[in-house]
Each structure stands twice: as C-alpha cells, then as structure tokens.
Image (cartoon, rainbow, N blue to C red):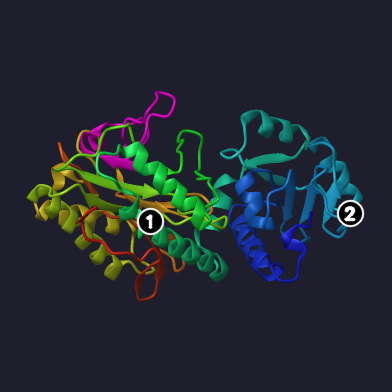
Amino acid sequence: MTIPFLTSDLRPELDLRLAKVREQMIADNLDAILVGSTVNIYYLSGCIFRGYIYISIDRKPLFFVIPPSFTDEKEFCVAVRKPELISEKLSEAGYELPSRLGLEYSDLLYSDVERLKRCFPGVEIADASMSLRKARMVKTDYEIRKMKEDGMHQAAVYSRIPHCYQEGMTDIELQIEIERELRREGCLGILRTAGSRMELNLGSVISGENADTPSPYDFAMGGEGTDPSLPVGANGVTLKPGTTVMIDMNGGFNGYQTDMTRCWSIEDVSELARKAHECSCRILHRLEEIGRPGLPISTLYSEAVEIAKSENLHEYFMGHRNKAGFIGHGVGIELNEMPVVMERNHESLLANMTIALEPKFVIPHVGAVGIENTYRITETGLENLTPFPEALTEI
C-alpha cells in the first residue's frame, strides 16, 4: 500500500492538518504525540493502517507501520513488529525522546495506553485526545468539499424514500429499503462515533410511540430497537395513519459524514405535530442567520429554547419523556465531534467549523417531528451542507 500522505496530490492537504495539530500541541505544551487510533490515523495520513504516527513539533512525522501494512517509502515509514521498538527506531532516525509525550487516552483502550507508556520510560505522558479533537474541529476546504459530496449523496437517497414506502410495512422494513438505497448510492456502511458508550447501525427510523421511548444514549428520541443488545431506533412497529416517521440515516460516503433528519407523515397528523415541525424549521432558519464566527455556542442553544418556549412547545422540545441537553454537535470523520451545542458551552463559533443542528420535538402518540441539517460556519452565517425540502409531507 501507499500512504496518501506521501503522494503529491494529497500531501499539501495533509500538511495543513499536520500544521493544525502542531499548533494545538504548542498550546497544550506537548513536545510530541504518538497517534494510534483509527480516526486520527486517517485524519493525518489519508488512510487506515496498522501502526502509529509520531508527530513532533519541528521534525518530519514518522509512520511506524506494522507489516503487512507497509509501503516501500523510506523517508517517512519505519517498519516495526510491535510498539516497544518505537523509541529505539526514533533514536536510530536521530530523534531525541520528548520531554512530554501525548497519547490518546479517550480513543485507545486503557491497556494500549499503559503499554505505550511503558515504551517511553522516563518521559512525562499526557492526554492528547482533546488536542487532536480541537485540531479536527475546524475543517480545511478539502474536508468541506468532502462533506458537501456526502450531503449531495445523502439528499439523493432521501429523495427516494417515498418510493421505498409501502402501506402496511413496519419501520424496520422501511429502514431496510433505505439502507439498500444508501449502499447503492455509495454509502460505506459504517457510522463512526466518538467514545465507547454509543452504538448505532446505519441510522434511525422512528415512528409513533417509539419516538417517546428513552434509550440509554443521550438522544432526544432514542427508540426501543429490536433487541436489548442494541436498544435504539426502529422496533418493528407497523407504520400507521396519524403518526410521523422520523428518518435520520447514514451520510458517510467518503471517510467523512453529514447528518440530516427529515420527517414524513402517514396520512394526516395532529395540528400540534405540524406546529412543532414548523417551529423546528423556524429555529434552524434563525440559527442560520446568527451563526457566525465569534458567537458564543451557548447562544445557539438559548435562542432555540426561547423560540420553542415562545410557541408553548417547550414541553416537547428535544424529547418528551427523556430530554437531551443539547441541540447539535460537531460532525466530520466522526458523527459526534466537537463542539457540543449546549447551554454550558460558552466557547465561540469559529469559521469552518461544521456542526449538525437538530431542534426536534416528540409529540406523544404521534411521534417525532423536526429536521436536522449539517452546516459550515461562515462569515455570513451558516451554510447548509444538506439542502433538502424541509416540509412535513405525507409519505
């Protein structure tokens, strides 16, 4: 294999990412970082391989690759059978051991972190997970182009959802048809999430009372799922008149992801459900106007809550039986990146952050309503990367 970092076409892009990581390393007083997680290896190399990437402040990065994942490129790549050889290989390459080395505490197993610590005796070890997440939080133009491609493919699949539906089918049967369309469109079939306490399949199709069923995850509407081993999403209920179908399916087609939710109704639904759906649209349009660099992220949350309260819909906002404490999140290589859009986050929006905003409502006995879009932060407001009709229409 050839690591894309070493090819001329992608090298300038990955150099930009490397510079962002180094800037964050300096801010966090790290002399070096040893990267071993799948997501960060992909971010810094353009591919996934078995091994590690050693990033120092001012020397070229070194790719410690465990065979058979290996390239003949000798300038950057070093073959190792195990991580215990890394410090020796660094010395052979003329690198001094760092005073303070960062490891990914939140992205590797505890046993892996402890093993890597033992590979660097006498070196101060620090947590570099947040440093890498902050570096990934602001996207390059290349990354944004990738996410726009994702949004285009995701919207193409959503346009075919009404043709997937047949009267009398269950939510699971509808989800299977949508998953088929996703794969035909080129979806990679994987939904990468940060952390170890959230597991998903290719997304959620939630209808009727199931939208009000809490899950163990921090979702506004979780759903029961079909088995206790994956207690989230569709539960096999038959789609029936007077209920909504909320569809929040996978948007990963190229290593990046977009997050988009749309709702349909089975025949007509209550006026309360329609009012709440229209409120969700109004909230997003308001946030699109004010979401500019420098705005405190908490303002997006408080503005959404105030609009829901002004329309007497707060009881149903971001859940009914179980309420989520956020209205959005960063998105990119992982579905749930930084920042979290919540009341306590007083950090400011930055240009070229990409965030998914999802002001949703759960109406008892009817189902979930509302929409979700993925946005890029620009100087003139939020740029929608997932444009698709927003109205609540009969499927």
Image position, residue 29 (x, y; %): 63, 52
Amino acid at pointer 2? Gly
What residue is drawn where x is 25% and y is 43%? 167
Q: How many marks?
A: 2
Query: In which image quadrant can residue 73 be found?
Result: bottom right
Q: Is residue 62 visible?
A: yes
Image position, residue 244 (x, y; %): 21, 45
Looking at the picture, tell me which residue is in the foreground, 3 or 58. Answer: 3
Q: Is residue 50 magenta?
A: no
Amino acid at pointer 1? Ala
> Is label 1 or label 2 in front?
1
Image position, residue 207 (x, y; %): 25, 40
Q: Residues within 10 Å of mark 1 (few under 14, many from 20)?
A: many
Instruction: Indicate left or right for 6 with 293 as reference.
Output: right
Question: Considering only order in the chain, which callout, 2 or 1, is on the residue closer to the N terminus?
Answer: 2
The kind of secondary structure element at disc 2 is loop
Q: Quadrant of the N terminus?
A: bottom right
Q: Main secondary structure of the magenta part?
A: loop
Q: Is residue 232 magenta?
A: yes
- The residue that disc 1 covers is 356
Q: Is residue 92 above or below residue 105?
A: below
Q: Is residue 98 above or below residue 168?
A: below
What residue is drawn where x is 88% and y is 42%? 88
- The residue that disc 2 covers is 94
What residue is drawn where x is 45% and y is 38%? 200
The kind of secondary structure element at disc 1 is strand
Please give the range of residues in magenta: 204-233
Of all residues, the one furthest to the top in this rendering is 228
